[in-house]
Amino acid sequence: MKRRNFFSLFGLSWLTSLFPIALSSCSSQKGEPSAASSNTPPTPKTSVRPDGYMSVGSVETLDRTGFLAVKISDKSAIVLRDSVRPNSLRAVNLTCTHAGCLVDWESKDKVFTCPCHDSQFSSDGKVRQGPALKPLQTYLAKLEGNTIFVNVNS
Ligand code: FES
């Protein structure tokens, strides 16, 4: 190898070895999100399928606790088994229809109670006691294997 070719090759190798250092100095400091990641919305934990259903959890959790707490379009809800037909599932929005407080699920009495003005709703969301006049919003829910799906469009 000629001396000139040796130094050309050596110089090229030296330059390419500096490339990662140059790149890292252009990126943000350690621990700070890069501009690309700060502009990227967080990846949703669940996604809605084209049929409107989204996966919300496992049947094991539902059966262990008697209900499954979920978020549907940023609203708190729980999935319950139908008391008459246990293989049927239903999701119930916990927002009281009177003035928007969050209702509590009383599993022993199988009733939703509102801590604000004492409205009560049955497990299917129907009004049992006012002042609320409208039922709690419900959503279709179903099992596929061991996974619970809720229809966010229902
Ligand atoms: S907000 Fe629930 S009864 Fe008034």
Image (cartoon, grey):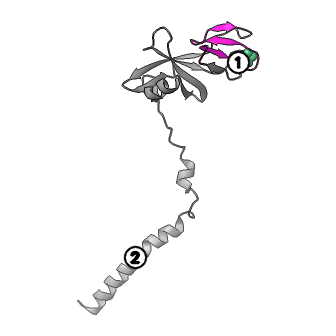
Where is residue 139 drawn, in percent x and y? 53, 17
Using the image as rendered, state which of residue 14 and residue 79 is in the foreground: 79
Image quarter where ligand 1 lies: top right
**Depicted 151 relative to depicted 19: above or below:** above
Q: Which residue range is magenta in the image?
A: 107-130
Q: Which residue is depicted at the point 58% across and 13% down?
A: 123
In the rendered image, residue 117 lying in the magenta stretch gets the answer yes
Mark 2 Cβ inside 8 Å of ligand 1: no
Q: Which residue is depicted at the point 39% across and 80% down?
A: 14
Residue highlighted by disc 1: 114
> Within the image, what quadrant is residue 72 found in?
top right
The N terminus is located in which quarter? Answer: bottom left
Q: Which residue is depicted at the point 51% across and 38% down?
A: 44
Residue highlighted by disc 2: 17
Nearest-to-viewer mark from 2 and 1: 1
Where is residue 143 drawn, in percent x and y? 41, 21
In the rendered image, residue 103 lying in the magenta stretch gets the answer no
Using the image as rendered, state which of residue 21 and residue 64 is in the foreground: 64
Mark 1 Cβ inside 8 Å of ligand 1: yes
